[in-house]
């Protein structure tokens, strides 16, 4: 084979092989849809799983439900939600009757429900707690609540602690509960902190690495009450609360940066749509500022974009337990991610792991009697469909519960994506396109070197 033909042959191979390989890997995936058949039109729901999240295009624009004849069916993308009953407590300002110090330190306040706002006794609400409004922080005081009848006779309703550990952890108790009773007046007694209470806060401060003398001075200052509010219970039904499943990331790497005083959790989700993350720490009694970031590419550079910021905290100390370990984010599909924890001068947290908060996403469609359906996905060139989903939306709003379908085994459908531009796929891959250019450059260089040698050996020969 002549040198010129060798060059031509290798050039054709360099071009043809990537395009053939690209065509073989561009296929969509197909999975059968299984559900109980009916003699009437049925509302059917498919729950998206890990493989769909991993392979589906951005915004799920490539998802197609097709019947046995290949016809595309309209579907509605639905996030599963549920109703949740919560007790909301409304706050009503009190009217102060008297206030005075007590022997040994501390003070007492007598107050009642505002008679101007509720002039009729029969219309007065029945509280089941009090909130003590104070501008102070870093405190711990004992409080006693008593109810007073019309004759002034007292009845003990509750005893407890008012506390705040803001400089150590986000935890504050400025309220106290009691069983609702028909009293018109109430009395609270706020006692001076005891030596035991001082040592409690000091111990917590030492564990957090903060200065004990400063905390002791704050603790010993007089306690101040701006006002007392009554807490009135009310049952509220919350509809449309998203159902979030906790899932581990595909990979997780925990890094400590001593220069920036940060702990960085780098993780990969497998392109799962996440609505938040949950930290799993071994450590207790902490408060940390955190921010969640996802990586994106600009040209050949990779950068990090901030998606959410917040505070994570945990308190587990002498009967006080409270934690806030979740960070919410607008639903996003991306990879990779990192959670950055600002430790400042505090020691790094001991971290067990991380959980992803993943919404349950379903495709809801109307299935005809006796028809077989399958789901196709994986075509990155697909455009977002525009379906008529008005009937499906109305049924869901009317609380019609769809039948949950199961997806079958994954079937690869190579070489038939339906995209007329699929042969250009190698040019969209920067790595593959760069390899082609590099190969052509090497071939061109070899050809020029051989031509130069021929000219040097025979000056009368043209290259």
Image (cartoon, rainbow, N blue to C red):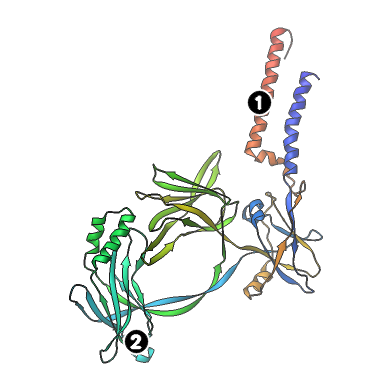
Would you place residue 161 above or below residue 56 in this image? below
At x 26%, y 92%, the residue is 151
Q: Quadrant of residue 318?
A: bottom left
At label 1, counting other C-alpha atoms closer than 10 Å, the crowd grade (few under 14, some 14-19, many 20 or more) is few
Q: Which numbered tag is attached to residue 118?
A: 2
Would you place residue 217 above or below residue 99 in this image? above
Residue 380 position in % (x across, y down): 67, 49
Residue 287 position in % (x across, y down): 38, 57
Q: Under tag 1, what secondary structure? A: helix
How many marks do you count on the picture?
2
Q: In which quarter of the image is residue 36?
A: bottom right
Where, quadrant-wise, is the C terminus in this rendering?
A: top right
The furthest residue to the left: 103
Q: What residue does disc 1 label? A: 441
Residue 279 lies left or right of residue 174; in this view the side is: right
- Could you tell which of marks 2 and 1 lies nearer the N-terminus? 2
Residue 46 position in % (x across, y down): 68, 63
At x 37%, y 61%, the residue is 170
Q: Under tag 2, what secondary structure? A: loop
Residue 48 lies left or right of residue 131; in this view the side is: right
Residue 308 lies left or right of residue 223; in this view the side is: right
């Amino acid at each position: 084979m002549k040198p010129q033909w060798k060059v031509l042959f290798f050039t054709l191979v360099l071009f043809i092989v990537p395009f053939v390989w690209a065509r073989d890997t561009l296929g969509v995936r197909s999975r059968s849809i299984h559900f109980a058949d009916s003699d009437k039109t049925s509302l059917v729901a498919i729950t998206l799983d890990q493989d769909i999240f991993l392979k589906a295009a951005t915004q799920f624009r490539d998802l197609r439900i097709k019947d046995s004849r290949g016809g595309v069916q309209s579907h509605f993308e639905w996030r599963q939600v549920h109703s949740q009953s919560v007790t909301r407590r409304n706050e009503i300002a009190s009217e102060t009757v008297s206030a005075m110090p007590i022997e040994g330190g501390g003070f007492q306040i007598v107050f009642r429900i505002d008679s101007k706002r509720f002039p009729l006794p029969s219309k007065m609400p029945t509280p089941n707690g009090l909130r003590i409004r104070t501008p102070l922080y870093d405190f711990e005081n004992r409080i006693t609540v008593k109810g007073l009848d019309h004759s002034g006779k007292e009845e003990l309703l509750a005893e407890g602690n008012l506390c705040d550990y803001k400089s150590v952890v986000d935890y504050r108790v400025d309220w106290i509960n009691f069983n609702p009773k028909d009293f018109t007046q109430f009395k609270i007694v706020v006692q001076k902190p005891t030596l035991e209470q001082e040592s409690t806060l000091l111990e917590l401060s030492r564990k957090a690495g903060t200065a004990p003398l400063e905390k002791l001075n704050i603790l010993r200052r007089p306690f101040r009450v701006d006002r007392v509010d009554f807490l009135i219970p009310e049952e509220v039904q919350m509809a449309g609360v998203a159902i979030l499943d906790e899932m581990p990331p595909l990979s997780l790497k925990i890094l400590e940066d001593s220069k920036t005083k940060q702990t960085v959790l780098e993780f990969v989700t497998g392109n799962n749509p996440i609505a938040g993350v949950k930290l799993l720490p071994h450590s207790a009694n902490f408060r940390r500022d955190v921010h969640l970031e996802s990586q994106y590419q600009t040209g050949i550079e990779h950068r990090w974009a901030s998606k959410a910021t917040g505070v994570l905290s945990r308190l587990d100390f002498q009967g006080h337990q409270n934690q806030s370990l979740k960070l919410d984010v607008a639903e996003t599909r991306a990879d990779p991610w990192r959670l950055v924890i600002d430790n400042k001068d505090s020691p790094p947290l001991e971290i067990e792991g991380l959980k992803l908060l993943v919404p349950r996403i379903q495709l809801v469609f109307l299935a005809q009697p006796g028809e077989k359906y399958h789901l196709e996905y994986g075509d990155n060139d697909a455009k977002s469909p525009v379906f008529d989903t008005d009937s499906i939306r109305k049924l869901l709003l009317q609380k019609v519960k769809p039948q949950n379908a199961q997806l079958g085994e994954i079937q690869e459908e190579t070489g038939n994506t339906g995209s007329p531009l699929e042969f250009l796929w190698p040019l969209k891959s920067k790595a593959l396109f760069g390899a082609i250019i590099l190969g052509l450059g090497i071939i061109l260089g070899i050809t020029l070197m051989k031509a130069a040698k021929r000219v040097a050996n025979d000056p009368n020969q043209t290259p």
